């Protein structure tokens, strides 16, 4: 565990490193990727070579063994300095399923290669078209046959699938009607997508309002080795839940980074833009929204810091991870709206990058979990209100 002084120094070094990378891949790089809907391969390669995406993997498997608070600072800095970690953030949190629940053989076989970048674990196959966020109602099936499982079904919103070697897949191994609780009978697999693509798996890109490389995936009698199973059969829902706190914390960090970008962008513009013979930043109608966004962001970051501390202490409740994601995404969206208003017509001009970041920030009101589901969780688990779904 890093001491406080050491952590401050590490964070400072990380921010300097990330800033240099983001300066190398500036606004025009991201605008071009956005226009052509291309994956930022070069950016991801640079982060990988610097070891930033392996920061949470233990040293024994080739990573840095850093806590989630440091991982959060990496993603926060990427977004604060104008880039987007959506192309690679799953490399940080998806591997946690293998790390926490995989066998020693799976850890030794995959984690060092994930840490080095030889293998990419970017795809997380959970959501389905008919189930949505009702994860226990998924219908993708993995049927055991000898030393294999045969997978049939469909996943949707599986981002980065075309740019990943491995996928963490959630599938039903026992029919829903044959279990006592609907959360039972689900299992998690680590599948090699390179093999699966040759044996019945197909990937179809989904064009969206932002460049997020998302897809839908079809499984048609896809055989996978029985050794692909992570942990025990039937306990996959529990395994997936254990990784969601990390995901929400890391996404919250990205939102804080976005908010900081919007606040700086708006403040700089408000100081420079002169209308009616004075900088528009002199007007309280411009000042107040920027100041409010700043306050929201600082408050959200404080909850994020607490969520990191609780996670590192072994807390599994999810309350602060959920609140961090809720408050941080709302702070980034409020900052995005404020930045658009501050820039006026120039906000929609591609060259300012505001409209791109605006679109990117909107995503986190609904992903990886919607705001309303977080509120339902807090109402039930913290306030004792009846379950609403």
Image (cartoon, helix red, strand yellow):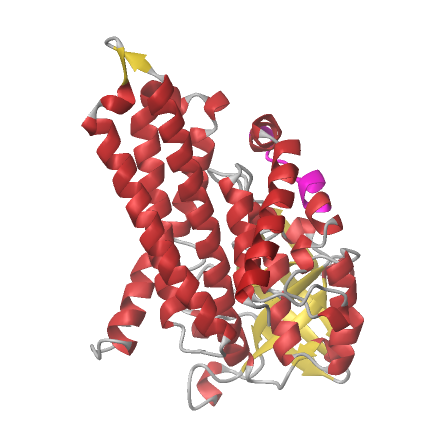
Q: Which residues are magenta?
A: 35-45
Residue at the spot 69% in from the left edge and 49% down from the top edge = 163
Q: Is residue 299 above or below residue 287?
A: below
Give residue 182's position: percent from left, percent from top: 42, 82
Q: Is residue 163 above or below residue 321?
A: above
Give residue 344's position: percent from left, percent from top: 31, 22
Q: Quadrant of residue 275?
A: top left
Comparing 172 with 327, the one in front is 327
Q: Quadrant of residue 172?
A: bottom right
**Magenta-highlighted stretch: main secondary structure?**
helix
Q: Is residue 105 above or below residue 156?
A: below
For the N terminus, give its image quadrant. bottom right
Comparing 24 with 234, the one in front is 24
Question: Is 303 situated left or right of 117 in this image?
Answer: left
Q: Residue furthest top?
A: 277
Give residue 273's position: percent from left, percent from top: 35, 16
């Amino acid at each position: 565990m890093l001491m406080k002084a050491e952590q401050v120094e590490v964070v400072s070094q990380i921010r300097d490193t990330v800033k240099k990378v983001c300066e190398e891949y500036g606004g025009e790089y991201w605008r071009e990727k956005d226009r052509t809907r291309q994956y930022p391969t070069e950016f991801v390669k640079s982060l990988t070579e610097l070891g930033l995406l392996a920061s949470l993997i233990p040293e024994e498997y080739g990573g840095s063994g850093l806590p989630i608070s440091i991982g959060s600072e990496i993603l926060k800095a990427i977004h604060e300095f104008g880039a987007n970690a959506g192309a690679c953030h799953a490399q940080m949190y998806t591997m946690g399923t293998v790390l926490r629940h995989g066998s020693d053989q799976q850890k030794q076989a995959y984690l060092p290669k994930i840490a080095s970048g030889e293998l990419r674990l970017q795809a997380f196959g959970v959501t389905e078209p008919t189930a949505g966020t009702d994860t226990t109602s998924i219908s993708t099936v993995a049927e055991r046959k000898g030393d294999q499982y045969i997978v049939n079904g469909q996943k949707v919103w599986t981002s980065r699938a075309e740019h990943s070697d491995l996928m963490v897949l959630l599938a039903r191994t026992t029919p829903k009607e044959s279990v006592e609780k609907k959360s039972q009978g689900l299992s998690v697999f680590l599948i090699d997508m390179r093999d699966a693509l040759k044996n019945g798996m197909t990937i179809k890109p989904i064009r969206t309002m932002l460049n997020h490389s998302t897809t839908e995936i079809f499984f048609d009698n896809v055989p996978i080795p029985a050794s692909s199973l992570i942990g025990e059969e039937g306990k996959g829902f529990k395994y997936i839940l254990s990784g969601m706190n990390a995901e929400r914390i890391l996404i919250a960090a990205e939102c804080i980074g976005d908010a900081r970008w919007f606040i700086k962008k708006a403040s700089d513009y408000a100081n420079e833009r002169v209308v009616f013979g004075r900088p528009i930043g002199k007007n309280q109608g411009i000042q107040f929204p920027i100041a409010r966004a700043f306050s929201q962001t600082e408050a959200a970051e404080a909850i994020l810091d607490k969520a990191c501390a609780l996670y590192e202490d072994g807390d599994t409740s999810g309350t602060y991870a959920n609140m961090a994601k809720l408050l941080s995404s709302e702070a980034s969206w409020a900052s995005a709206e404020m930045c658009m208003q501050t820039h006026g017509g120039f906000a929609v001009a591609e060259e300012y990058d505001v409209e791109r970041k605006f679109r990117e920030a909107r995503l986190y009101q609904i992903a990886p979990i919607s705001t309303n589901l977080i509120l339902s969780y807090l109402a039930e688990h913290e306030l004792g209100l009846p379950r609403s779904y």
